[in-house]
Image (cartoon, rainbow, N blue to C red):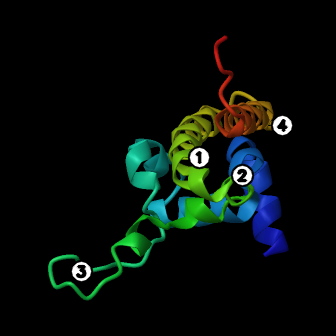
Amino acid sequence: MKYLSLLTTSLCPNMAALCGPSVSANLISLAGGLQPLTRVPSCNLLVFGSPKTSISSGTGNVAAHKNGLVMGCPVVRGAPEYLKQRTAKVLCNKISLASRCDLAGGQSKGETGARFRAEIEAKIDKWDSPDKSQH
């Protein structure tokens, strides 16, 4: 796992900075590579790695269908319970952008991924803060 983390950090630093090296390596593996991952719509990233369920037969857990690899990211795990799904959707959007930045090879240190992560954490704080009442 250490080797995989090092390899992911060097090949796709923005994704590794955003969602962690192990989650980014698993997403790349499930997509079939970094280039195919850039073609996946961000709404579909949410279910990558989730168990296959059969909704029509009624035997599968429908709630588990939305819990993919992204739900294991430290950003999502650190969010309050009622904001986890919303955070995961925003994170999927940023993962899609970060993978495209990594494929283009612009920044090799992961500054874009770190900036995206800071933006998401700021959004979580804003969502979690109580609304200001108007007097």
> Compared to 121, does 57 lie above or below?
below
Return the residue nearer the eye: 110 or 124: 124
Pointer 2 or 1: first along the chain: 2
The numbered dot on residue 109 is 4
Q: Which mark is residue 75?
A: 2
Nearest-to-viewer mark from 3 and 1: 1
Tell me, yes or no, if residue 63 can be seen here.
yes
Considering only order in the chain, which callout, 4 or 2, is on the residue closer to the N terminus?
Answer: 2
State whether residue 52 is above or below residue 82. below
Structural distance between the alpha carbons of marks 2 and 1? 8 Å
Q: Position of residue 27 (x, y in %)?
A: 55, 61
Q: Earlier in the sequence, mark 4 or mark 3?
A: 3
Name the residue at 31% across, 79% down.
Answer: 53
What residue is at 51 percent from the left and 39 percent from the top?
Answer: 93
Tag 2, which secondary structure? helix
Q: Which of the marked residues, 3 or 1, is nearer the chain's N terminus?
A: 3
Callout 4 amino acid: Lys
Q: Which residue is mark 1?
A: 87
Residue 106 x/y as whole percent: 70, 27
Q: Amino acid at mark 1?
A: Thr
Q: Amino acid at mark 3?
A: Ser
The numbered mark, 3 or 2, whose residue comes first in the sequence reads 3
